[in-house]
Image (cartoon, helix red, strand yellow):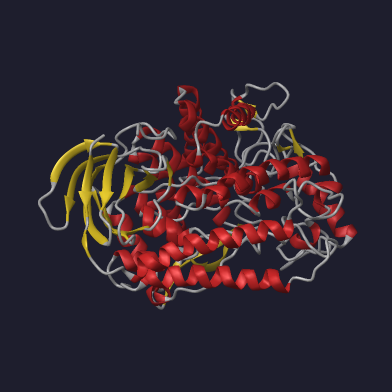
Amino acid sequence: MSARLIGQPAAAPTWALLQRHLLRAMAAAARHFVGRYTQPDGTLIWRESWPGMDGSDDGYESFGNFALFYALGGDADIHAISRREWDAVTRQFTAYGQVHNEFDGYYDWMHHGESSTSFYAFGFADPTVAKDVERTLRFAGMYLGEDPATPNWDAAQRLIRSPINGSRGPRFENSAEDWVTHRPILAAYPPPFEDIPGAPGPLCDWNDDRIFGEVLERLNARMMRGDVPLNLACTSLVTHAYAYTGDEKYRRWVLDYTAAWRERAAANGGLIPDNVGPSGQIGECLEGKWYGGYYGYRWPHGINTILEPVLMAAANCLLLTGDSSWLDFPRSQLELLIGQGERRDGVQYVPHRHGDAGWYDFRPLQARFHTHLWYLSQRADDWQRLLDLGPRGSWDVVHGQRGKGDEGHAGPWIRFLEGALPDYPEQILRANDAEMRRRLQAIADDQTTVDEQDVHHWQNLNPIGTEALVQLTLGGPQLIYHGGLLHTRLRWFDAAARRPGLPPEVGVLVEAVTPDSVSLQVANLHPTEARPLLVRAGMFGEHRFSSLACDGAAAQPVDAADLALVAQPRSVACLTLGLRRYAQPPSYAFPRW
């Protein structure tokens, strides 16, 4: 394809210098991290055995953003490291007994989702790797009813048969051994049921064997048979298979399974129930209660682990169809929860839990849910609901430390897009750099032994963070950590190296997104060399460009999924790209160079 020359001579923008610094520094930090904590074969330097069903997700999470970092423009060896570590974690946790046939034997889809984000990113890194495709189709087949050894799917009832599922099929009865590593953690959460002897709340001591015995008996009787909204996170795995193959069966399954849950919500007065039994009946194993299921409205996290999978599934359906009405599903859930809430000092509080006495645990609603909804819909009313959440003042604060995921700055990013926080690009880049340095210092200070290290040890030290790069270069929010796919306006390729990500010395800053355009700056910091690059409309090529305006010139019509550009040396270009969103099927396929 013919390339357009872009850019005018300009001093190097600070944001571009910080962006390139972050790409260089994080690659070096990642190598240091891997060298410190892994064996030559990539396995974690850790204990010989690890019991229970919890842990493989944390192994994968320890390197979970490496492949995405490469796909954004990180060094090529980080891609190789990401693949080596995925294989090594798979071997190690197979030896521990948790992984079977390269997929977790049985666990819930909050944890499957966490462990899958690195696997999904391999599609962005290199979609031609045959082993990735084979694994993806085999894993998806476990949920489409294609593998008789893993009967997770009930086609007649359109449900996943248990909240605990995986490569060993649905697990209808948990053992004490399954929960052994999680008991100390869950002791800090409310009791899962209201009739546990000796555990009236507010916490439930899973470390007490007598109480744990009562909990386990009720878990098996009430929670382990039938479906829960959390399983909607599985739609990302099946959408991932579609992006590799374009096979209609994957598209059809995602739409049908999401529709089944939408119908269950309609049957429950509009609010999605948090459980259905083996026959598809709401509350079948919970005395008719629509609440109280596994990862439901009561336990352990409340509404967040219901809203997340509903939003992920609707986003996947939109990606697969271009039909924005799928977003009515998460929108309706947010509206119903807000209707049960109240405003305090200009801040929207919503109930985060529901029990026999009704709604309780009122807290501010996290901005990220409405951020994703608005970003996907581009509707003015969704934007207004986002702005109405409050507290807007807290959105001006760019903090440093991050948790397990790379997300955490949805509010400040929105403030930047509305023009109220112009320094946000520099602030978030500096914050990501500071967090990387804090983690490197923690690595330097780490004197723990393998027996002292819990399964979260390495993910808490992983120095790579991608939130700033995703927001600023791709023009989208960071993916939902528990298994969401990455939905963005743009994607970049290095046309000279024929690889994904920004070319060397090139920085990008997306400054505005509208329903039909995206505005950005492209800076080439190299003093003497032009940089050929290619920009794609959408992370999956799901959009098409409709026009291109550069440096104040009149917009020229185009009709393409990819645009070839050449950034002149020592230059900055200001571009506005017209978009037709969701104009074509999503695919991982690389450009035709």
Q: Nearer the viewer, residue 221 or 324?
A: 324
Q: Is residue 331 visible?
A: yes
Pick out the residue farthest to the right: 210
Coordinates of residue 210 in the picture (x, y in percent): 89, 58
At 48% from the left and 60% from the top, the residue drawn is 23
Quadrant into which the N terminus falls? top left
Quadrant into which the C terminus falls? top left
Seen in the picture, residue 153 relative to 399 is either above or below; the reply is: above
Coordinates of residue 506 in the picture (x, y in percent): 36, 57
Seen in the picture, residue 226 relative to 51 is either above or below; the reply is: above
Seen in the picture, residue 353 relative to 433 is either above or below; the reply is: above
At 32% from the left and 43% from the top, the residue drawn is 534
At 16% from the left and 57% from the top, the residue drawn is 551
Count of labels in the image: 0
Coordinates of residue 13 in the picture (x, y in percent): 31, 69
Q: Nearer the viewer, residue 27 or 163?
A: 27
Q: Is residue 340 visible?
A: no
Seen in the picture, residue 157 relative to 377 is either above or below; the reply is: above
**Quick check: 63 left or right of 391?**
right
Coordinates of residue 435 in the picture (x, y in percent): 55, 70
- Residue 395 placement: quadrant: bottom left
**Quick check: 254 left or right of 84?**
left
Pick out the residue farthest to the front: 528
Q: Nearer the viewer, residue 64 or 14?
A: 14
**Quick check: 162 left or right of 376?**
right
